[in-house]
């Protein structure tokens, strides 16, 4: 079992009876029943179902309504996170420019769908074996909808974004819906 773990959950490579691989995402057991965790999983599923963008994994199955064990399965991306592939090492200029352009194009496509990722970091970017960049982990994303305003209230007071860059707009009562946050984190 190939697994990737973040602060809030785990992703495991799974296979269905037809031989199709998927990425099974589940919250850590100690957080799986918290309202905020279930809300983030629901948001991620809704966002991924809305975004039909090359470079964003598609949802294959979800079980969010079962609050005892929320999960979803998306496309599996074979590759390494940008952090694991290149973190802390000098890179070829052309590769760096290519990955930067791919990220900018992904963010432009995401923002055209009125979605703000809000957690752009090397661990949420996967470089596939063919060099294609994938953007993952939309757990704290914001998208234009009435339900999102309720979710933002749930997230008030909690830290948003990532551990190495805390933007002013992610502080309590800040504007948490600005696409420029994604661009800043990408830079």
Image (tube, helix red, strand yellow):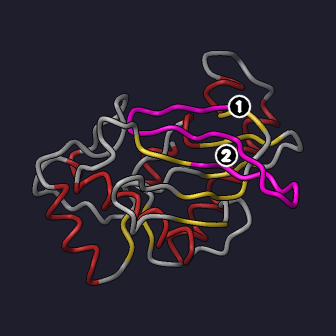
Could you tell me how far apart the alpha carbons at marks 1 and 2 are, in whole angstroms?
27 Å
Residue 92: image location, x then y, percent: 80, 26
Left or right of residue 44: residue 104: right
The residue at 70%/31% (across/down) is 2
Query: Quick check: 104 above or below 147?
Result: above
160 and 45: which is toward the camera: 45
Query: Quick check: 103 above or below 129?
Result: below
Left or right of residue 51: residue 156: left
Q: Residues within 10 Å of mark 2 (few under 14, many from 20)?
A: some
Residue 57: image location, x then y, percent: 67, 60
Query: Quick check: 100 above or below 144?
Result: above
Let me know if residue 9 is in the magenta part.
yes
**Label total for image:** 2
- Tell which residue pokes out farthest to the top in this image: 89
Segment colored magenta: 1-24
What residue is disc 1 on?
2
What residue is disc 2 on?
100
Say which element carries label 1: loop
Mark 1 vs mark 2: give the one in front. Answer: 1
94 and 4: which is toward the camera: 4
Residue 103: image location, x then y, percent: 64, 52
Q: Quadrant of residue 96?
A: top right
Q: Which quarter shows the N terminus?
A: top right
Say which element carries label 2: helix
Tags 1 and 2 in contact by the CB under 8 Å rule? no
Residue 16: image location, x then y, percent: 78, 56
Query: Quick check: 15 above or below 44?
Result: above
The residue at 63%/61% (across/down) is 106
Let me know if residue 73 is in the magenta part.
no
Q: Which mark is residue 31?
A: none
Q: Quadrant of residue 140?
A: bottom left
The residue at 44%/77% (across/down) is 114
């Amino acid at each position: 079992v190939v697994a990737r773990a973040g602060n809030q959950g785990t992703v495991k490579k799974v296979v269905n009876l037809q031989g199709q691989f998927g990425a099974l995402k589940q919250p850590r057991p100690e957080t799986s029943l918290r309202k905020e965790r279930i809300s983030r999983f629901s948001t991620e599923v809704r966002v991924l179902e809305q975004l039909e963008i090359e470079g964003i994994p598609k949802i294959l199955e979800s079980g969010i309504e079962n609050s005892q064990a929320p999960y979803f399965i998306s496309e599996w991306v074979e590759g390494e996170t940008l952090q694991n592939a290149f973190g802390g090492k000098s890179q070829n200029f052309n590769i760096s420019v290519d990955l930067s352009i791919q990220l900018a194009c992904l963010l432009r496509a995401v923002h055209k769908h009125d979605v703000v990722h809000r957690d752009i970091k090397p661990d949420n970017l996967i470089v596939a074996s063919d060099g294609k960049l994938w953007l993952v982990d939309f757990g704290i994303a914001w998208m234009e909808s009435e339900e999102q305003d309720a979710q933002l209230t749930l997230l008030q007071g909690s830290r948003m974004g990532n551990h190495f860059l805390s933007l002013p707009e992610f502080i309590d009562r800040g504007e948490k819906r600005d696409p420029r946050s994604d661009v800043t984190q990408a830079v």
